Image: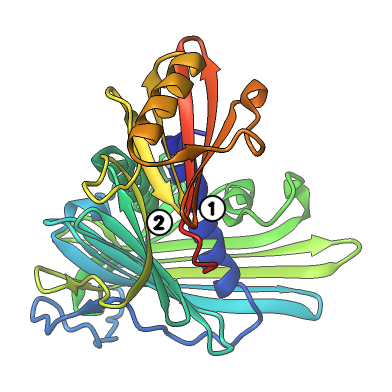
């Protein structure tokens, strides 16, 4: 498995952990974000909402800008779900800074366990409760993952002629224009919720409203809801909202101080790395005692390189524990052991190294 696939897998695991933490049955309570700062751009605690200024009028389309284009923001996302007697509610907070790029996302499970992910200066930090892990990313991986995280497609390209202009309102200190898009096809709402089957005939009602900032062009507030009738399970309800609390230059996101472990997916071999690495190595990574990379070389060339390099570095080849026919080799040095696993595909070899320092930890 190459470094890029491992990065994707690890990011998906982190996202899953945050999702699972936020989906446990709970009361919807705001969680503290990783952002600090005394912003004067918008009063973050302001909840004043003005009444619409005009009668609703039909509009051909609704256009919004991307949140990735603002200098920084803090936002809150809430979701409530119920099906029969079961349900959950969750609140997630997010902060974002455009330059230098940084973001944080926090969820609270409601039982005292919080999970958080931050991205600061090329490194993604994640924690559950009080344990922080650092993941050093390459610029390409950081851009890909941040782009995925900041994806804010509101599905408005599907809503032409489906929204009513409800007039101007003030939301959290922002001058906005309120749009009601209840006429949107209900199967679109079902797809956005991601909770239902494709049988849109079972969806009884749904709403979609948004408030677009006149200054920034972004959706300051969005509300979606639906009711779905299942013949076996009963009535399903889903409510979702996202609200921008603050936009400005004063949002601050900092790296945590106490990091327990570090995974390196930067693609660059660290100067502190203890084992030999072949010239031309790419896609370098290290995590949980394992390191690896890709190199344009045959498996035989890789094994020959390590036979010579490990011996020169004081390691002894363990013929008993090695299985060259399966691309597996082992060396010992004092209490340490190193295992090499190599596989070849069309002239490129994937190299994995596992170093055990013999401490038993």
Residue under the point 53% across and 18% down: 344
Q: Position of residue 297 (x, y in %)?
A: 41, 15
Q: Are marks 2 and 1 in contact (CB under 8 Å)?
A: yes
Residue under the point 61% across and 72% down: 23
Q: Is residue 212 visible?
A: no
Residue under the point 71% across and 54% down: 196
Looking at the rendered structure, the secondary structure element under dot 1 is loop
Q: Is residue 237 above or below residue 270?
A: below
According to the image, label 2 marks what residue?
A: 164
Q: Position of residue 257 (x, y in %)?
A: 25, 77
Looking at the rendered structure, the secondary structure element under dot 2 is strand
**Mark 2 residue crowding within 10 angstroms, few (<14) / some (14–19) / many (20+):** many
Residue under the point 46% across and 31% down: 351
Q: Is residue 26 above or below residue 16?
A: below
**Nearest to N terminus: mark 2 or mark 1:** 2
Horizontal placement of 36 versus 331: left or right?
A: left
Horizontal placement of 164 versus 232: left or right?
A: left
- Distance from the alpha carbon under mark 2 to that under mark 1: 9 Å
Q: Is residue 303 above or below residue 60?
A: above
**Rendering quarter of residue 284:** top left
According to the image, label 1 marks what residue?
A: 183
Q: Position of residue 109 (x, y in %)?
A: 56, 80
**Mark 1 residue crowding within 10 angstroms, few (<14) / some (14–19) / many (20+):** some
Horizontal placement of 159 versus 36: left or right?
A: right
């Amino acid at each position: 498995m190459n470094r890029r696939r491992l990065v994707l897998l690890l990011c998906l695991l982190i996202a899953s952990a945050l999702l699972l933490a936020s989906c446990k049955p709970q009361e919807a309570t705001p969680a503290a974000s990783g952002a600090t700062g005394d912003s004067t751009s918008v009063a973050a605690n302001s909840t004043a909402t003005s009444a619409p200024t005009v009668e609703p009028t039909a509009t051909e389309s609704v256009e919004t800008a991307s949140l990735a284009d603002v200098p920084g923001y803090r936002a809150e996302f809430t979701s409530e779900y119920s099906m029969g007697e079961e349900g959950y509610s969750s609140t997630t907070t997010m902060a974002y800074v455009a330059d230098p790029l940084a973001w944080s996302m926090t969820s609270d499970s409601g039982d005292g366990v919080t999970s958080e992910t931050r991205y600061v200066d090329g490194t993604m930090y994640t924690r559950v409760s009080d344990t922080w892990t650092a993941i050093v990313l390459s610029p390409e991986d950081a851009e890909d993952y941040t782009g995925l995280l900041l994806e804010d497609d509101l599905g408005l390209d599907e809503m032409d002629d489906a929204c009513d202009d409800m007039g101007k309102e003030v939301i959290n200190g922002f001058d906005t224009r309120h749009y009601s898009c209840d006429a949107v096809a209900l199967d679109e709402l079902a797809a956005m919720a991601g909770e239902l089957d494709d049988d849109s005939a079972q969806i009884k009602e749904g709403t979609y409203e948004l408030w677009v900032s006149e200054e920034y062009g972004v959706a300051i507030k969005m509300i979606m809801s639906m009711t779905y009738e299942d013949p076996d399970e009963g009535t399903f309800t889903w409510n979702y909202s996202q609200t921008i609390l603050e936009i400005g230059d004063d949002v601050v996101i900092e790296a945590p101080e106490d990091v327990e472990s570090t995974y390196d997916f930067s693609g660059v071999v660290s100067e502190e790395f203890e084992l030999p690495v072949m010239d031309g190595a790419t896609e370098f990574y290290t995590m949980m005692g394992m390191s690896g990379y890709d190199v344009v070389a045959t498996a035989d060339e890789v094994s020959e390189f390590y036979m010579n390099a490990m011996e020169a570095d004081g390691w002894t080849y363990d013929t008993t524990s090695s299985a060259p026919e399966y691309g597996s080799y082992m060396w010992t040095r004092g209490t340490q052991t190193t295992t090499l696993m190599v596989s070849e595909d069309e002239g490129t070899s994937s190299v994995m190294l596992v170093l055990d320092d013999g401490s038993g930890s």
